[in-house]
Image: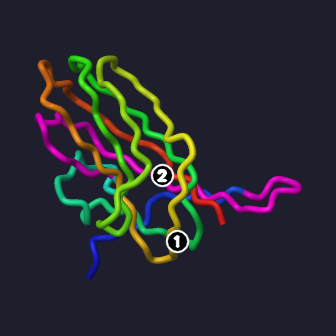
Amino acid sequence: TSNTTVATTAYVDKAVGASKHKILLCFGCASSTPADATTYYAGSLVSQGLRTTATQPSVYIPVTGTVTKWWVKTFSNSTGSNESVNYYLRHNDTTDFGNVTDQLDVQYTDVASGTTSQAVSAGDSIVVKIVTPTWATNPTGVTVQGWIMIEQ
């Protein structure tokens, strides 16, 4: 059996005159208190906290297309001390792409990837990789969620 599960997927109709379908995959994790200098993963296990193994929360890719954008939203019960947190998408547990950087120095943050271009195939997996710094003050009760856009 596989640990890969299907995340919530929204199929967005093509706009009039548009040449591509857009599919949104949702990801997230329950409240966690991240440790210093640790790599975590978030994905389809939204009822669980941050994971340290990429395959556990991986999101199943339902279509062949290109990841063109993604968003990360975080909430924390207490703020950190302004060090940078790096977020990546990890494709098939081998390739990191789409890096965004944020600071958990406020309770709520919202960052987007800008433009990215990563080919994916139906049956692939993707997970959000989170690399934490060594904080002077660690944030607590951190929840991560977001969306990954795939265009066909």
Quarter holding residue 4 = bottom left
Q: Are marks 1 and 2 in contact (CB under 8 Å)?
A: no
Residue position for label 1 = 62
Q: CA distance from mark 1 to mark 2?
A: 12 Å
Extent of the magenta region: 13-42
Residue position for label 2 = 26
List x then y, in percent, for residue 56. 24, 63
The three-letter amino acid code for the residue at tag 1 is: Pro
Above or below, comparing residue 118 to residue 132 in the picture = below
Q: Quadrant of the C terminus?
A: bottom right
**In the displayed structure, does residue 37 sit left or right of residue 122?**
left
Q: Which of the pair 77/22 is nearer the observer?
A: 22
- The local crowd at label 2, few if under 14, some if 14 to 19, many if 20 or more residues have their Cα within 10 Å, is many
Quarter holding residue 96 = bottom left
Quarter holding residue 13 = bottom right
Above or below, comparing residue 126 to residue 110 in the picture = below
